Amino acid sequence: MSRIQPVLPSTATGLPAEHLAATKKLFGSTPNLFTTAAQSPATLAAMNGFFASLGKAPLGGKVGEQVAIAVAQANGCEYCLSAHTAIGGMHGVSAANLASARHGHSDDPKTQAAITLALEIVRTKGRVSDATLAAAHTAGFTDGDIVEVVGHVALNIFTNYLNNLAETEVDFPLVAIEQAA
């Protein structure tokens, strides 16, 4: 049971109803993360905008979803791990690459550079090493791409923390957090 009650789209009024309608238009449904965030209409509006903008950004859905999976695993967010695994599959990411992302790996060098950068951003709170930044550039990342990875990390940290705090009910096929050995 969620510790923050979701706003039901069927009973929402005013700004929450408007923002939940925008969520449904954007995603085709209103996942529990968004109905929970609807407790703050400003937060839901910002979250919708962040997802919509990054969804159209140059790195694309495949890379973005693998970064989200790696960050969710690092932050222990079962909701986001489950959601982004399902969404990554819809973007055509193979089951093997979805599983590898949980461990911070990809068989694609540019995706690997994005995951490595993202996880170091999480681990160091943005104080990444010169070597990691240089490796991202060597993999073909522009400064804009690097800023986009920071955007993905920031959005995913927000959703991870909200879901962890709220104990949002997972409404995607469950993917359990793997504990470090």
Image (cartoon, helix red, strand yellow):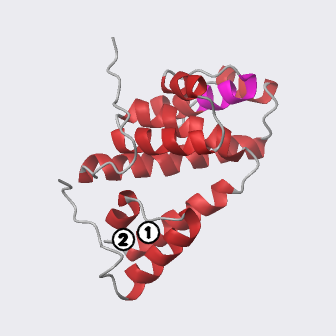
Residue 38 - label: 2
Residue lying furthest bottom:
14
Label 2, label 1: how far apart the Cα atoms are: 5 Å
Residue 100 figure quarter? top right
Residue under numbered circle 1: 44
Residue 1 at x, y percent in the picture:
17, 53
Q: Compared with residue 158, is residue 88 higher up or lower down, i.e. above or below? A: above
Q: Can residue 134 be seen at all in this image of the molecule? A: no
Q: Are marks 2 and 1 in contact (CB under 8 Å)?
A: yes
Residue 115 forms part of the magenta stretch: yes
> Mark 2 packing: few (<14 Cα in 10 Å), some, or many (20+)?
many
> Mark 1 packing: few (<14 Cα in 10 Å), some, or many (20+)?
many
Q: Residue at x 63, y 34 (%)?
A: 93
Amino acid beneath label 1? Leu
Q: Residue at x 33, y 53 (%)?
A: 162
* 167 to the left or right of 63: left
Majority SS type along the magenta span: helix
Amino acid beneath label 2? Ala
Q: Nearer the viewer, residue 61 or 152?
A: 61
Residue lying furthest top:
181
Q: Residue at x 18, y 56 (%)?
A: 3
Residue 73 at x, y percent in the picture:
42, 31
Residue 38 at x, y percent in the picture:
36, 71
Q: Earlier in the sequence, mark 2 or mark 1?
A: 2
Q: Compared with residue 109, is residue 70 higher up or lower down, i.e. above or below? A: below
Residue 45 forms part of the magenta stretch: no
Highlighted range, magenta: 108-117
Label 2 element class: loop
